[in-house]
Image (cartoon, rainbow, N blue to C red):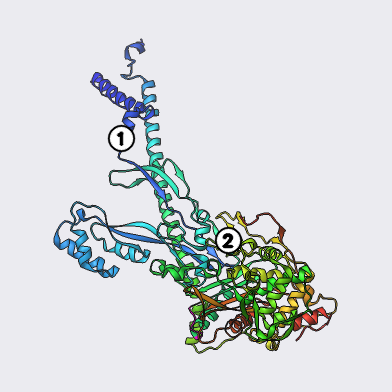
Amino acid sequence: MKTRRNRKKFSREAAIPSPFFMALGVGMLIFFVYIWLDQRCEALGRRISQLEGQKVELQRQVKQERSRWESAKSLEQVERLLQRHHVAMTWPDERNIVRIRRTVEEPSAMEAAPSRRQFARVGGIAND
Amino acid sequence: MVLALIVVLALWMLLAARLVYLHAFPSPKLVADSQGGHIIKRELPVSRGRILDVHGSILALDLPMKNVIVDPTLTTNDQQKYAVSMQLAQTLNLDPAQILWRLERPHSRYQVIQKFVSVETSTNLAGMKLPGVFFEDSSTRRYPHGALACHIIGSANLQGVGGAGVEQRLNSMLKGRPGLRIGEQDGKHRELYNRRGTEIEPQDGADVHLTLDLNVQYLVEQALDEAMRVRQARRVWCLVERVHTGEILAMASLPTFDPNAYRTADTNAMKNLVISHTYEPGSTFKLATVAAALNEGTVTQDQIFDCENGKWFFHGKILHDYHPAGRLSVADIIKKSSNIGAAKIALTLGEERLENYIRAFGFGHRTGFDLPGEEGGILAPHARWSDLSISRIPMGHEVAVTALQLLNALCCIANDGHLMRPFVISHVEDVKGRTLRRGVPVEVGQPIREDTARLMQKLLVRATEPGGTATKARVPGYTVGGKTGTAVKFVNGTYDARYNVASFAGFLPAERPEIGIMVVVDEPQPLHTGGLIAAPVFSQIASNVVRCLQIPSSATLLAGAAGSTGGVP
């Protein structure tokens, strides 16, 4: 005859209840997520700072180049360069200007050019 | 065993709970204690706005620079100090002894070695990793075109505050608003990027766009430079204005200064003579007198006046003409610039009406121009005039005006009697492209009728025709109208004929005036009349400016007006 095992006799209760492990696991998870987020924020912060530095540097370079370009294309500088390369330039004389003939339909020079316009606003202070 | 495990876990849990508590519900005292030394409050630098001409050429901008600083406590021994001073001196081109002197201050942690060093130089220095050397951000104002248009632009000091010109007038718009960053730093003074709290973005200064044309300005300054040299003049100044709108295209005074080195500039050179210097205008002022009399109908252009062959006694004092003449019409009084004729024309008006017209033309008070430092000139009320005043004021004595006032009055005549307010600031635009301020043409009055103005235009053209005083003001291809002026200067309590102010104010093309130009030469030698000194400078400037601005020649305008299909001169 087979003897029936007494399950109660062999059942062993865990030393720490499973809900405790679950809480611990959740806690660990939150901890690791916190650590990960912290690291991520740190990395993003570094990247932002790096990009800020790059932006400042690029802005500086743009300003520097603008200043150089303005100095390089200043009329005094252009004239100096022309002299250095023995290039003599002058404004064209009225006789040297070729004007394209107008047709009758087109407005005359007097009409085409800005007429005696009065843009003015009488009185009032629009400039301040 | 199990019990021990439970105890350990319980302790850990307590610790964790405490940490969570501290994190979630921090005590203000603890927070203050922990953050006291870690909070950083940094002002974010702002860039001052640019100043640009009508074509967008940059006249002024901010350039980022670095200040080189040393902390003497971080250089430990004499050998190190010597090495640092030598390296700094070599790179910054300074005296090593001076740097060494600064390094030998053990109680100081902040010694400025040099301010406004270029970023390239500071990068080189940073690469050397010199102990105790660090860098601060700074910026400096740069004017790429040097002295060109310096009196309009003005200058800004090292603190970024405008001290003259546009820089001063629009300082509040140019300077912008610095940003603010409040965050935390670690024990090594490194910023904790993820602990940034307040962050207010800096707002760069607005860009100021002028009506000034840099090409015209350059042509004007070149001509003035030559005039000053050839005529051995003390000072020269010039103004170019658009007749219909009052826009200023060029404004120059010589001597000039370089705003990049304004601290070493001569204070006299920093004065904008066009708006800040008043002088007795001489005969150029006659245009106001004659225009007033014609407008009131007290004279006609053909009316004859006896000009007394150049000598006329009035209230016991003699009045001379530079070119003596007998009987002259009103038209010829302008052409020959007769003082006696102008005085007699003024007498037909009377004191009160003459004063009213002069004031209506904008004399005796400021025009309301954009730049600071404008003078209003001197014009006494007629109640305080002497018996002689009615004969002297019409020829430009006993009054003081600025070149801006005089040219504006001439432009009023050229603009059919409409007096415009001159302006040089076109618009101000912030970094987001919003217009903060716009300069628009404003008519401030109409001292004379249109028909009087057109008649005056014709009379002023005669001054540049053969026999007139301003034949040297002529411009090939263009009809010019204008008036010469020669005023003896009042020196040491008396009028001294050795010192004169020669001037010419003109407009062109006379068929449809576009621009007005005024040239003033102070104390030219040996010649001194406006016709011989200022008129040729006007001609030189106008010849180039009309091409630069592509103003059609008189022949083209006449051909167009006649309905020609051609247009080729």
Q: Residue at x 45, y 50 (%)?
A: B178
Please give the residue where the numbered disc 2 appears in the rendered image: B370
Q: Quadrant of residue B3?
A: top left
Cα distance, mark 1 to mark 2?
54 Å
Q: Residues within 10 Å of mark 1 (few under 14, many from 20)?
A: few
Q: Which element type, helix, strand or loop, lies under badge 2? A: loop
Q: Chain of mark 1?
A: B
- A68 or A7, which lies in front? A68
Q: Quadrant of residue A3?
A: top left
Mark number, residue B34: 1
Give the position of the C terminus of chain B as an image quadrant.
Answer: bottom right
Q: How would you classify the magenta stretch by its main secondary structure?
A: loop
Q: Quadrant of residue B308?
A: bottom right
Q: Position of residue B255 (x, y in %)?
A: 47, 75
Report the side of B505 relative to A59 (left or right): right
Residue B307 part of the magenta-drawn span: no
Report the side of B487 relative to B454 (left or right): left
- The amino acid on which the numbered mark 2 sits, given as a three-letter code, is Asp
Residue farthest front in this picture: B316
Boundaries of the magenta span? B230-234
In the displayed structure, would residue B148 be above or below residue B537? above
Give the position of the N terminus of chain B as an image quadrant.
Answer: top left
Q: Is residue B553 visible?
A: no
